[in-house]
Image: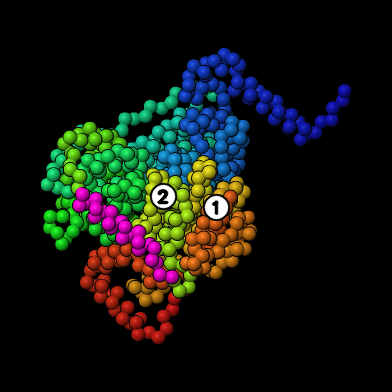
């Protein structure tokens, strides 16, 4: 029989033969399979670097890898498909990092992104930075240019990936040989989750994905959580002293220990306030939960409870704050506006976070769960009688706050943003996931959106990365099948990541994208107008959201008044698919405690000369007939 040969046919035949040889090498028969079976949890056997990386992800139980394939990682992405590793194609690498972040915050397990070198890395840096500052565990699989003897100079994407990643990661593992791949990936998961969680990168030259190696990689040893016994011994009598009223300030480090946190609060009869990231560690329905923060910037309930009742000297406020798993970062403290208590006990898994903002009596380097467990073991020393006055005061203040949400005046030209927050709480199930974004309304939601369960309320807190909520919500929806997921996003933030809504349409991810549209960066306007009597670079274009939704392939709802707010939001939530919801928003004179408190504190810190310059400029502009804003 004669055969017709061509260059393409020869190449295809060589590829087929090479594939068969690689398959035979990777699967050495029943003996190798039996050896692997005797090593559960190991990456075991002869396989390519790409296969070993996939086996490491499988061993970690990864629910999804977020990213975009590229020339340097096509071998790896093809192996994802071959090995059944779940993945999601995104539109931008910023979104890949945010999606992995949304996965991590909503599941409590490290989220995974996979990006190519060069622009793939640089595009992802903002999302990785958000995860780093917000203590969210991520593992970034990063391709690199080829290494080894055959590697040529001036390869495409030849940026220094490792040095780019270091400032936004807890650790960067640079793989040099194919033998290191499985161990580096497995260790990255341990490092991302231990101590204070954060992102970790594994950088792999792309030529190593096709090299083969005999792997014998055991699971990495997880380090014991930190616990400073001596510091605990100093903190215990301070907390047990019945002359002092204790209040708890809990951060995201407590998120996995809500039951223990509530039990300790009940022992101490201590009100529980949280950071923004810590919202939901104990549900707002708990009798001792008072909301976010304890200063003038945050929940009014928390501020009043921690301050006590000045009219009744015997009903004093909190004088000892037990801060657990929290950093006192700028946004959560309103420009460091929390009042200084008489005593502070600060507990954190990262010793670098301890005692950095407030004057602290005892710094305890300890994991939040271990510390709470030890406190519960000392219950006889800590137990206090039920404080009925405190419980009644918290109940009454929370009831007043709830009533205020039922009487929000109609806005003149749209919807008051606080009304949108209140309506979302009414129409969303208690276990729904809400992702907020960087807008004025993030502070309204942090105070007024009632959070019932852990890992259901999310905010880009410490890096304040605009546009975070849209991809983060998609990352969570991808693995929370059947659970309601929504965003609360300003129109300015939407511009940063709007095209990711096409991912929702393509994959039928039923996120409800609630957009507060006022055609401006209203946050900046609130900060600029009092100081400059005008705004600069804050006016946005007027978008046709209906056409945008149609182009994206998602359903559309438009809300222009309070009268239709709840019904239309409820209809959007009930829709079986992604929905773009435009809420015509009128901030009017809506007061925001966070903005007012930060402005007051900033003004107080100005020198006399700085205040004089501000006043002179304001005076001259006040008499101008024309005030230009753009």
- Going 44% across and 76% down the picture, which residue do you hit? 629
| Image point (56%, 34%), residue name | 85
- Give the secondary structure at mark 2: strand
* Label 1 Cα crowd, 10 Å radius (few <14 / some 14-19 / many 20+): some
Tell which of 402 and 181 is nearer to you.
402
Q: Residue at x 41, y 50 (%)?
A: 457
The residue lying toward the viewer, choosing from 566 and 473, is 566
Q: Is residue 272 left or right of residue 91?
A: left
The residues colored magenta run 388-410
Inter-mark Cα distance, 2 to 1: 20 Å
Residue 177 shows up from this direction? no
Q: Quadrant of residue 77?
A: top right
Q: What residue sits right under mark 1 in the picture?
A: 574
Q: Which residue is mark 2?
A: 457
Horizontal and vertical percent position of residue 409: 40, 70
For residue 546, which quarter of the picture? bottom right
CB of mark 2 within 8 Å of CB of mark 1? no
- Colour scheme employed for the rendering of this structure: rainbow
| Disc 1, SS | helix
Residue at the outermost top position: 31
Numbered-mark total: 2
């Amino acid at each position: 029989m004669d055969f017709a040969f061509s260059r393409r046919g020869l190449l295809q035949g060589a590829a087929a033969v090479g594939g068969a040889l690689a398959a035979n090498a990777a699967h050495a028969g029943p003996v190798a399979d039996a050896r692997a079976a005797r090593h559960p949890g190991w990456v075991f056997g002869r396989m390519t670097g790409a296969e070993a990386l996939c086996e490491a992800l499988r061993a970690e139980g990864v629910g999804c890898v977020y990213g975009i394939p590229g020339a340097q990682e096509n071998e790896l992405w093809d192996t994802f498909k071959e090995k059944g590793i779940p993945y999601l194609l995104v539109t931008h690498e910023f979104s890949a990092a945010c999606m992995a972040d949304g996965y991590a915050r909503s599941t409590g397990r490290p989220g995974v992104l996979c990006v190519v070198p060069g622009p793939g890395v640089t595009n992802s840096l903002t999302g990785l930075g958000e995860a780093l500052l917000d203590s969210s565990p991520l593992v970034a699989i990063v391709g690199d240019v080829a290494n080894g003897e055959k590697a040529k100079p001036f390869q495409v994407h030849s940026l220094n990936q490792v040095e780019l990643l270091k400032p936004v990661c807890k650790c960067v593992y640079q793989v040099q040989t194919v033998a290191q791949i499985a161990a580096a990936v497995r260790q990255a998961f341990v490092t991302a989750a231990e101590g204070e969680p954060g992102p970790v990168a594994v950088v792999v030259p792309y030529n190593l994905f096709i090299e083969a190696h005999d792997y014998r990689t055991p699971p990495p040893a997880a380090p014991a959580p930190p616990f400073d016994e001596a510091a605990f011994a100093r903190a215990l009598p301070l907390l047990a002293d019945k002359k002092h009223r204790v209040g708890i300030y809990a951060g995201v480090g407590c998120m996995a220990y809500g039951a223990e946190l509530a039990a300790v609060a009940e022992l101490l009869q201590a009100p529980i306030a949280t950071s923004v990231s810590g919202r939901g560690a104990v549900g707002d329905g708990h009798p001792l939960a008072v909301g976010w923060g304890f200063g003038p910037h945050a929940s009014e309930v928390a501020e009043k409870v921690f301050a006590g009742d000045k009219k009744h000297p015997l009903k004093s406020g909190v004088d000892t704050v037990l801060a657990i798993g929290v950093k006192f970062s700028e946004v959560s403290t309103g420009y460091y506006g929390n009042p200084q208590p008489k005593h502070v006990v600060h507990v954190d898994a990262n010793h670098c976070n301890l005692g950095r903002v407030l004057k602290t009596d005892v710094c305890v380097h300890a994991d939040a769960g271990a510390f709470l467990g030890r406190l519960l073991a000392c219950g006889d020393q800590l137990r206090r009688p039920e404080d009925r006055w405190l419980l009644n005061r918290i109940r009454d203040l929370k009831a007043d706050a709830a009533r205020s949400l039922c009487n929000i005046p109609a806005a003149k030209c749209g919807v008051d943003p606080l009304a949108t927050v209140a309506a979302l709480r009414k129409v969303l199930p208690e276990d729904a996931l809400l992702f907020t974004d960087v807008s004025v309304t993030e502070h309204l939601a942090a105070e007024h959106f009632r959070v019932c369960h852990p890992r259901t309320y999310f905010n880009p807190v410490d890096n304040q990365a605009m546009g975070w909520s849209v991809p983060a919500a998609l990352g969570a929806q991808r693995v929370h099948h059947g659970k309601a997921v929504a965003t609360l996003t300003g129109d300015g933030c939407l511009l940063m990541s709007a095209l990711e809504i096409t991912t929702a349409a393509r994959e039928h991810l039923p996120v409800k994208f609630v957009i507060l549209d006022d055609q401006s960066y209203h946050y900046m306007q609130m900060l600029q107008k009092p100081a400059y009597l005008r705004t600069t670079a804050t006016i946005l274009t007027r978008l046709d959201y209906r056409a945008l939704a149609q182009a994206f392939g998602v359903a559309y709802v438009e809300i222009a008044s309070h009268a239709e707010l709840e019904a239309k939001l409820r209809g959007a939530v009930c829709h079986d698919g992604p929905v773009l919801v435009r809420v015509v928003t009128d901030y009017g004179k809506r007061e925001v405690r966070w903005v007012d408190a930060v402005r007051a504190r900033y003004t107080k810190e100005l020198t006399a000369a700085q205040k004089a310059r501000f006043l002179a400029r304001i005076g001259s502009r006040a008499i101008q007939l024309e005030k230009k804003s753009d």
